[in-house]
Image (cartoon, rainbow, N blue to C red):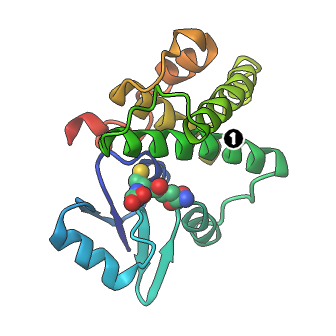
């Protein structure tokens, strides 16, 4: 089984944490460099990572990769509540990736623009709920939603995207999970 990704992507990292105790090959790519981009394009027209190859099967998108691996690893299906937790985490992650790419494209995301404001509103509203859930110990079990949350928070800290001092329960959750299997080897700071 091959996992295509990058060292810094929080979406890739959650799958690496899931596969921490499962034999697989991690293929580290720079998807904005031409050679790796062509390699990815040949297999995956979405040009996004993560992507999983398992013999003849190629799976795009971390959500679908999770479902594929959960079936293969015989994991209990996520509850609807957990699915919603994942959607909240994805909402924050997608909006932060969008703003990050805007900044990298030379745009000033501090400007009063509909697109920037919509991302920031979504981030604030979703982070508020995630903070409450963390305070209620709803991420206490090291299952996929907790893995995804850890990867989001660690990436936010690494890229200095949000001030997490406003979210003490999320900071406590992050600190409590630094030693989980696969966390050290998948640290974005190793990039
Ligand atoms: N919904 C996708 C999102 C993946 C995603 O946004 N990956 C980023 C890296 S963190 C990416 O490939 N970005 C490339 C681009 O947007 O061109 C998933 O869950 O796998």
Write down the quadrant of residue 6 in the picture: bottom left
Q: Confirm whether residue 86 shows in the render.
A: yes
Q: Position of residue 114 (x, y in %)?
A: 61, 38
* Residue drawn where x is 55% and y is 15% of the image: 172
* Residue drawn where x is 18% and y is 63% of the image: 33
The number of callouts visible is 1
Q: Is residue 42 above or below residue 177?
A: below
Q: Nearer the viewer, residue 45 or 74?
A: 45
- Quadrant position of the N terminus in the picture: bottom left
Asked whether mark 1 lies closer than 8 Å to ligand 1, one says no
Ligand 1 shows up in which quadrant of the image?
Answer: bottom left
Q: Residue furthest front?
A: 112
Q: Is residue 87 above or below residue 129?
A: below
Q: Secondary structure at mark 1?
A: helix
Left or right relative to 96: residue 64: right
Q: Is residue 105 above or below residue 161?
A: below
Q: Residue furthest bottom?
A: 56
Q: Position of residue 69 (x, y in %)?
A: 56, 67
Left or right relative to 84: residue 148: left
Q: Position of residue 29 (x, y in %)?
A: 24, 62
Q: Confirm whether residue 16 shows in the render.
A: no
Q: Is residue 107 above or below residue 20?
A: above
- Quadrant position of the C terminus in the picture: top left
Write down the quadrant of residue 129 in the picture: top right
* Residue drawn where x is 69% and y is 28% of the image: 130
Left or right relative to 185: residue 66: right
- According to the picture, the residue beneath numbered tag 1 turns out to be 88
* Residue drawn where x is 57% and y is 22% of the image: 173
Left or right relative to 185: residue 153: right
Q: Residues within 10 Å of mark 1 (few under 14, many from 20)?
A: many
Q: Nearer the viewer, residue 27 or 118?
A: 118
Q: Nearer the viewer, residue 134 or 9?
A: 9
């Amino acid at each position: 089984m091959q996992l295509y990704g990058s060292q810094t992507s929080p979406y890739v990292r959650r799958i690496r944490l899931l596969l921490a105790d499962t034999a697989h090959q991690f293929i580290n790519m720079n998807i904005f460099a031409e050679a790796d981009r062509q390699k990815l394009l040949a297999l995956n027209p979405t040009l996004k990572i993560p992507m999983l190859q398992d013999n003849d099967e190629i799976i795009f998108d971390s959500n679908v990769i999770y479902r594929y691996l959960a079936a293969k690893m015989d994991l209990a299906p996520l509850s609807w509540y957990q699915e919603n937790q994942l959607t909240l985490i994805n909402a924050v992650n997608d909006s932060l990736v969008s703003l990050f790419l805007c900044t990298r494209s030379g745009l000033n995301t501090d400007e009063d623009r509909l697109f920037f404001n919509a991302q920031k509103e979504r981030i604030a509203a979703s982070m508020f709920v995630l903070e409450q859930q963390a305070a209620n110990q709803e991420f206490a079990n090291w299952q996929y939603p907790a893995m995804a949350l850890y990867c989001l928070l660690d990436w936010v800290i690494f890229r200095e995207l949000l001030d997490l001092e406003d979210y003490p329960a999320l900071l406590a959750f992050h600190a409590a999970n630094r030693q989980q299997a696969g966390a050290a080897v998948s640290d974005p700071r190793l990039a």
